[in-house]
Amino acid sequence: MGVEFEPRIVAFMCNWCTYAGADNAGIARMESPANVLPIRVMCSGRVSPEMVLRAFRAGADGVLVMGCHIGDCHYSSGNHRTIKRVPLLRNLLGYAGINPDRLRLAWVSAAEAPRFVKVTKEFTETVRELGPLSQEVAHQEVRE
Amino acid sequence: MIEELVLSLVEGIRKVVAERLEELDGVVALRRSSEGVAPHVFRKGDDLSELEIAPRYPLMTVVSKLHKTFPDIRLGIVARGCDERAFIEMAKRDQIDPDRLFIIGFACTEEEAQECHCSAPAPQNLLVGTAPPPGPPNPVVEKYDEMTIDERRAFWQRQFVKCLKCYGCRNICPECFCEACAMEDAAWVEPGLLAPPFPVFHLIRAMHMASRCVACRQCELVCPAHIPLTVLYDLMRRDMETLLGYVPGTDMDAPPPLSVTLEEAPLRVAVEA
């Protein structure tokens, strides 16, 4: 023992708001957790349940879905899908025995660099508390 | 007594089908032959004594294929409550043309409603039989909220490990119509694993069914590993109703809520973001 658990977090960020917000946080030299692996998507509405579940399968301990605030979507209503989909997927994770707090939806605009930092820090700590997902999901063996 | 009831039900259906065949190009139903029971398009003049209603088999995917292949064909279908609900969801997703399908609805028996935990065991367009009282809710679903997250995980791991990846649940589903299935896409479900990988395989399906599952329970009935899939799907149906006020298969005019804007299908519960 002795090596502290560092959560691995996949963050899907929309191209127009959150990715720009994250970029601005970097330009302003704000510190945000290195645990977060950003994946840029054109819209948070593009983030399908497959993508989130595959991230967990691939070893993510937590998944963030981030995009424009409602009303600010570059495609008018792309994030309307997201705000309906993510709560359902959170519930489904809970039903299947994965803590729903491992998935979070957060709106972060391009002008909200401090909020980007706050959300990623908070979420990293939440997932750190929860521990590695592998504790919850034993990776299944290949049956001969 | 039950046999008599079913017999008179089938007789009633055959009579309505005969009447409807005067104006329709065909009626989709089950037919008994020397080789067993299978879907069939009955035409005018066919021997309707071969028409059966058991075993249950979803026919809406058959109708969908016929409608797409023959753009002018006008069909009837012998349908239970769940068949009609499947029709409604398929129609609003442009998989069936509602103007070219006539529902010959019949009621399930009380025993069937009990067995299926069915909340609506008769179609809206009920032409034959009397609607039985709804069945009781699934007892596992009723008590599910009391289970801890560890108990839930243990429950599903015991179930999913039995999965043979036969895709029977998807193949029988009256609502599965995608030409390319995410459950067969190596990008999401890595191939070659038995049991199929968790959480991707089963949870992808559960999410895709969330706004579509009409609780026909066919997936559970065909599952060779006896995985109680409808527990998961019932929970998702419950959440769809709580979150978006949507009950699949009840209202032709209600848009599929996950595919439309908040103005068209608003949230009923505040979501933190």
Image (spheres, helix red, strand yellow):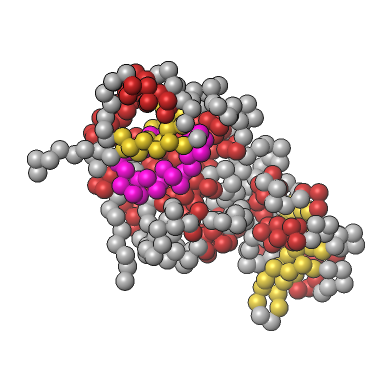
- Quarter containing the C terminus of chain B: top left
Which residue is at 29% across, 55% downward? Answer: A139
Q: Residue furthest left?
A: A2
Instruction: In this rendered view, identify the residue nearer to me: B200 or B15.
Output: B200
Which residue is at 76% across, 57% downward? Answer: B67
Residue B115 visible somewhere in the drawing:
no
Q: Where B172 falls versus A76 (above or below)?
A: below
Q: Residue furthest right?
A: B22
| Residue B182 on image: x %, y % | 50, 53
| Residue A75 horizontal side relative to residue A69, left or right | right
Residue A10 visible somewhere in the drawing:
yes
| Residue B164 on image: x %, y % | 42, 66
| Residue B90 horizontal side relative to residue B225, left or right | right
Instruction: In this rendered view, identify the residue nearer to me: A64 or B143.
Output: A64
Q: Report if residue B30 lies within the magenta region.
A: no
| Residue A17 horizontal side relative to residue B214, left or right | left
| Residue A111 on image: x %, y % | 43, 17
| Residue B222 on image: x %, y % | 52, 64
Residue B107 occupies which quadrant of the picture? bottom right
- Quarter containing the N terminus of chain B: bottom right
Q: Report if residue A55 lies within the magenta region.
A: yes
Instruction: In this rendered view, identify the residue nearer to me: B185 or B96.
Output: B185
Disc tally is 0
Which residue is at 64% across, 30% downward? Answer: B264
Residue A1 occupies which quadrant of the picture? top left
Which residue is at 50% across, 35% downward? Answer: A42
The magenta segment:
A43-65
Instruction: In this rendered view, identify the residue nearer to me: B121 or B27.
Output: B27
Q: Residue furthest front?
A: A27
